[in-house]
Image: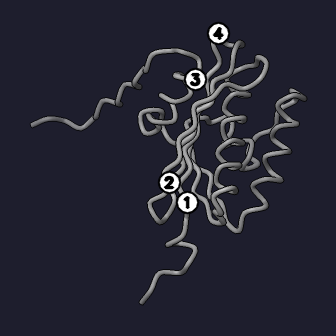
Amino acid sequence: MDSPPHLTTKWQLWFDGSAYPNPGRLGLGVVVHGPDGQHIELSTTAHGTGCNNEAELLALEQALLLAREAGATHLRVRGDSDFVVRHLNGDAHTDIARLGTIIMRLRIQLDAFASVSLEWVPRHRNPDADRLSRAALGLPDKPAPRPISRRRRR
């Protein structure tokens, strides 16, 4: 039996944002993988300055723009920003007007796709987008430490 079309045509988006210092200049990193082998990377700065949460939101906005331009309709989006995931999934609210404006804009953009899943991942599972966001600011790669297994050794 064939898989439903939305499972075989899902685009994979990875995003990360950096602020240096925090608040400071904003670096955005995005990786987009299409179901037919498409691969797009973006490493850029955003205009002005802001905090790390703003950088994360703007990185997601760039990822959505690239996906839309590539013709994506079904998305699986991953990022290591708990702030972004909780706010866009409706589990949190911010009183910071500047961030609230971006969140509202992103909700509209997300609604334009046929389906979207937005997931938090630990930083060590988002290395490419992290590297790209730091590179945009001229910062060296800073790999996230992998968690230590708590299993007992025999």
Relative to 54, 38 lies left or right: left
Identify residue type, mark 2.
Answer: His
Colouring rule applied to residues: one colour
The reply to whether dot 3 and dot 4 touch (C-beta < 8 Å) is no
Secondary structure of the residue carrying numbered label 2: strand
Residue linked to disc 3: 136
Whole-number angstrom distance, CA of label 3 to CA of label 4: 13 Å
Which-is-in-front pick, marks 2 and 4?
2
Q: Count of labels shown?
A: 4
Q: What residue is drawn where x is 63% and y is 62%?
A: 72
Whole-number angstrom distance, CA of label 1 to CA of label 4: 32 Å
The reply to whether dot 2 and dot 4 touch (C-beta < 8 Å) is no
Numbered tag placed on residue 95 in the rendering:
none
Residue linked to disc 2: 33
Check the image and report above or below for 118 versus 58: below
Residue linked to disc 1: 11
Q: In the orientation shown, which residue stands out farthest toward the top?
A: 21
Identify residue type, mark 1.
Answer: Trp
Identify residue type, mark 3.
Answer: Ala
Query: Residue 111: percent from the left, percent from the top?
Result: 78, 60
Numbered tag placed on residue 21 in the rendering:
4
Whole-number angstrom distance, CA of label 2 to CA of label 4: 30 Å
